[in-house]
Image (spheres, rainbow, N blue to C red):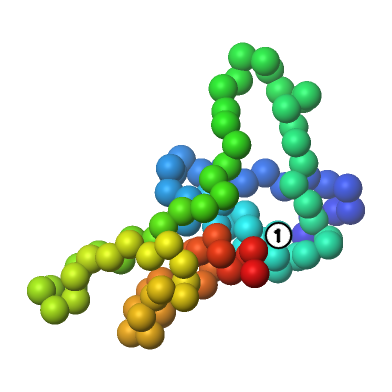
Amino acid sequence: MLKVGGRLTYSTCSFNPIENEAVVQSVLEHFKGKIHLVDIKPEVSKDLKYRPGLTSWAVYHKSKGKYNPAEWYKSYDEVPELRQGVCQQTMFHDVYTK
């Protein structure tokens, strides 16, 4: 729905990379070659404070009782099969760098 040469802005109020960087990575992968990131630094106020996005992060899965403890996963390859429905591939940075 974006016209050629148009801009799409994605903004959240979250510090969670699954809601930020992972979403952007997923969209870039899905529309590979049709869209790209644009550095808007020259267009914004010099007083705007920001920092580059994360390039890696871990995904947390909360505990489901004493036999299923909470865990952090750094890679989708670490996720046990029974948690792959909750911890999806698109949540991880490594699926885009393979």
Q: Tell me where residue 95 appears, x and y as whole percent.
A: 58, 69
Residue that lies at the very extreme toward the bottom in this rendered image? 81
Question: Is residue 29 found left or right of 95 in the rendered image?
Answer: right
Name the residue rendered at 70%, 59% in the picture. 28
Residue at numbered disc 1: 28
Name the residue rendered at 62%, 54% in the picture. 24
Question: Is residue 68 found left or right of 84 in the rendered image?
Answer: left
Residue 83, picture quadrant: bottom left
Residue that lies at the very extreme toward the right in this rendered image? 4
Q: Nearer the viewer, residue 96 or 5?
A: 96
Label 1 amino acid?
Leu
Q: Tell me where residue 87 appears, x and y as whole percent.
A: 41, 71
Question: Is residue 83 found left or right of 21 in the rendered image?
Answer: left
Residue 86, picture quadrant: bottom left
Residue 80 appears in the rendering: yes
Count of numbered circles on the image = 1
Q: Nearer the viewer, residue 68 or 4?
A: 68
Name the residue rendered at 74%, 47% in the picture. 37
Quadrant occupied by the N terminus:
bottom right
Residue 88 appears in the rendering: no
Q: Looking at the image, is 93 positioned above or below residue 87? A: above
Q: Tell me where residue 23 appears, x and y as whole percent.
A: 57, 57
